[in-house]
Amino acid sequence: MLSSDGKIEEGLLVNLSVPGCMLKTSMKLRVGQYVDLRLSFATGQNPLQIKLAAVRWVKDGMAGIEFIRMSEADQAQLRSLAGYVEKHRAQQIWSERVVCMGASLG
C-alpha cells in the first residue's frame, strides 16, 4: 500500500533493498514526490511501515522508491529481509600496561 496527497493505492513489490524498493503501481507518481508505504509479505512477516519515502524515478508503471524515515525495528527487519550483512571492523584493544621511560613528572 502506498499513500500520497490523500490518495491510497496498492502496488506490487518488485525489488527490495536496504536503501529502498522498486514498485509496480497504477498510481501516478512524480519524481521527487513523497509517499508513505506499508509493505506486506506473503511469508507472514510483519508489514514494514515506511513513514517517509521519496520517488526517485518513474517509468512504465514502475517506480524507484528511496526509504527516508522508518522505525529502528522496521530498519532491522528490512536488513534481515534484504539479506544485508553489516561489516564490522575488528577493534584492536591494547591490553598491556604502558610504561613511559625517561619522562619527568614534575
Image (cartoon, helix red, strand yellow):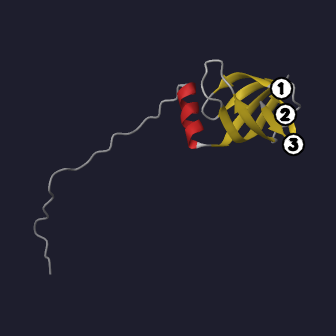
Q: Earlier in the sequence, mark 1 or mark 2?
A: 2
Furthest-top residue in this view? 42
Q: Which mark is residue 8?
A: 2
Q: To which residue does mark 1 refer? A: 59
Q: Residues within 10 Å of mark 3 (few under 14, many from 20)?
A: few
Q: Amino acid at mark 1?
A: Lys
Task: Please state which of the two labelled residues, at mark 1 or mark 3, is closer to the viewer.
Answer: 3
- Are circles 1 and 3 on residues that touch, CB within 8 Å? no
Left or right: residue 3 compared with residue 71? right
Please tell me which residue is depicted at 78% across the width and 33% down the height of the picture.
Answer: 2
Q: Quadrant of the N terminus?
A: top right
Viewer-closest of 45 and 95: 45
Residue at the image position 33 percent from the left and 40 percent from the top:
90
Q: In the rendered image, which residue does mark 3 sit on? A: 5
* Residues at marks 1 and 2, CA–CA distance in whole angstroms: 20 Å
Residue 99 in percent (x, y) is at 12, 61
Residue placed most toward the observer, 94 or 20: 20
User: Residue 24, image x and y in percent?
Assistant: 79, 23
Q: Who's the residue at 14% across and 77% down the image?
A: 105
Q: Amino acid at mark 2?
A: Ile
